[in-house]
């Protein structure tokens, strides 16, 4: 599921999407069902013209879809995240330059 939210800046808000946690039944795992769901969701988000998708998830898994830690941009999360998992606060620009000039706090 994708939900609309914003990166709140001092004078402007940038509309983005949040990716909800995924769950696949144990007996159906390792069939790339979650990967297929993510790819369909990202394709729909691009088609609808959104700039980025944000989530708190395992960076090693989601990096294969292009997600990177928000620290790569001037973006933070509104949640108080423990330092040991801060690199799991990740974002994916949906097109080249999608987050260019964007900074602020993602409202979760």
Image (cartoon, helix red, strand yellow):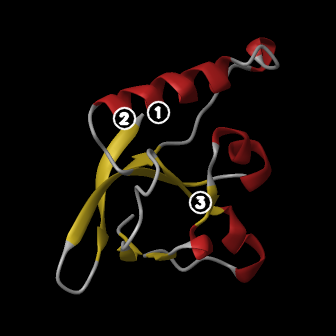
Q: Position of residue 15 (x, y in %)?
A: 26, 57
Question: Would residue 14 appear left or right of 11 to someone viewing this image?
Answer: right
Question: Would residue 39 appear left or right of 51 to someone viewing this image?
Answer: right
Quarter holding residue 104: bottom left
Furthest residue in direction bottom, as rendered: 10
Q: Residue shown at 65%/39% (left/top)?
A: 65
Quarter holding residue 41: top left
State which quarter of the image contains the N terminus. top left
Q: CA distance from mark 1 to mark 2?
A: 5 Å
| 9 up-or-down from 93: above or below | below
Q: CA distance from mark 3 to mark 2?
A: 16 Å
Question: Would residue 19 appear left or right of 72 to someone viewing this image?
Answer: left
Q: Residue shown at 45%/45% (left/top)?
A: 94
Q: Position of residue 64 (x, y in %)?
A: 73, 40
For marks 3 and 2, the one nearer the N-term is 2
Q: Which residue is mark 3?
A: 90
Question: Would residue 99 appear left or right of 57 to someone viewing this image?
Answer: left
Q: Which residue is mark 1?
A: 42
How packed mark 1 is, by other alpha carbons closer than 10 Å (few <14, some 14-19, many 20 or more), is many
The numbered disc on residue 60 is none
Q: For the residues labelled 1 and 2, say whether their Cβ atoms are less than 8 Å apart.
A: yes
Q: Residue shown at 64%/58% (left/top)?
A: 68
Q: Which residue is mark 2?
A: 45
């Amino acid at each position: 599921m994708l939900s609309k939210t914003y990166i709140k800046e001092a004078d402007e808000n940038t509309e983005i999407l949040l990716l909800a946690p995924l769950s696949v039944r144990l007996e159906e795992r390792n069939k790339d069902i979650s990967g297929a769901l993510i790819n369909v969701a990202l394709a729909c988000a691009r088609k609808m013209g959104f700039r980025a998708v944000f989530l708190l998830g395992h960076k090693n898994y989601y990096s294969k879809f292009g997600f990177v830690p928000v620290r790569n941009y001037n973006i933070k999360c509104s949640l108080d995240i423990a330092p040991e998992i801060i690199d799991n606060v990740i974002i994916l620009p949906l097109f080249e330059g999608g987050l260019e000039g964007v900074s602020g706090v993602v409202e979760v």
